[in-house]
Image (cartoon, helix red, strand yellow):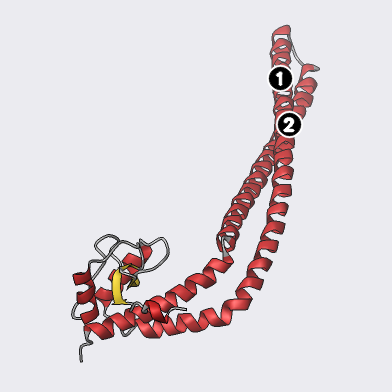
Amino acid sequence: MESTIAQKLDSLLKLQDIDSKLDEILKIRGDLPEEVRDLEDEIIGFETRMNKFKSEIDALNSEIDNLKASQKDSERLIAKYKDQQMNVRNNREYDAITKEIELQELDMQLADKKINEARARIRLIEEDADRTKATLNERNEDLKVKKQELSVITGESQEEENQLIAEREKHIKKIEDRLLKSYDKIRNNSMNGLAVVPVSRGACGGCFNIVPPQRQADIREHKKIIVCEHCGRIFADVESVEPASNRR
């Protein structure tokens, strides 16, 4: 059996009440959840940077090892060439071997230069890594504190929040998809999270613009869903104005 307009509005109003209570719970937490997420993202960035530093240092140490191995090869060749120099038959052979020795010595000097450059680069990376690690430790401490704060605040309202979420899940099954989508869209576009409001003292309960008397009469009849022409919020009903004589 299809719900009447009055029943649909009542369901939306109940949903709005649940969502408003959830909003209050989230409001108490303030920016803490976002701060925790930001810190977690920042920490991941620092950890990625630390891993990159380690990879760069490993690559430079590997390069140094290769250069040292190359130097040892050059040393062996120089020793071999010097032995050969002792047994040359003419100046031409002697000069050729001498040139080979000089080339190997130049290779060793170049390797020395590259080793020193690599070590200097490692020192710079290690300095960056130390600074990054110090900042990472600070951020981890900040995260620990923020998580503790959030845990305390969340713990105080967790049971109520879980009940409201369960109630919300049960409740939205009673509302047709098209109407629920409209409700969610209006709510998401609203600064205060209100999608369903009453007409209070002749004005929209959301944007406070005046609602004409005839429109108020239509809203009271509950024959169709009426929205505010200024803010688009759904009107649930028109609140009765208490007579001045009863206000004390």
What residue sits 33% from the left and 79% below the top? 240
Residues at discs 1 and 2 in contact (Cβ within 8 Å) = no
Camera-nearest residue between 165 and 133: 165
Q: Residue 101, how many percent across, how many down?
A: 73, 19
**Which type of secondary structure does the marked residue at label 2 adopt?**
helix
Name above or below for residue 49 compared with residue 94: below
Query: Would you place residue 23 above or below residue 71 in this image?
Result: below
Residue type at mark 2 is: Ala
Query: x and y percent of residue 39 in the render?
Result: 61, 56
Asked whether 140 or 80 is in front, the reply is 140
**SS category of the residue bearing label 1:** helix
Residue sitting farthest toward the bottom: 1
Is residue 163 shown left or right of residue 126?
Answer: left
- Name the residue at 34% across, 77% down: 241
Q: Residue at x 66, y 48 (%)?
A: 50
Image quadrant for the N terminus? bottom left
| Residue 110, image x, y percentages | 70, 23
Rate crowding at label 2 as few (under 14), some (14 to 19) or many (20 or more) other CA atoms within 10 Å: few
Q: Please tell me how many numbered marks the rendered image carries.
A: 2
The residue wearing badge 1 is 106
Circle 1 residues within 10 Å: few <14, some 14–19, many ≥20: few
Gap between marks 1 and 2, in whole Å?
Answer: 21 Å
In the rendered structure, which amino acid carries the disc numbered 1? Leu
Confirm whether residue 225 shows in the render.
no
Give the labeled residue for mark 2.
Answer: 120
- Specify the label residue 241 is tagged with: none
Q: Is residue 2 left or right of residue 98?
A: left
Question: Does label 1 or label 2 sit earlier along the sequence?
Answer: 1
Q: In this image, 10 relative to 56: left or right?
A: left
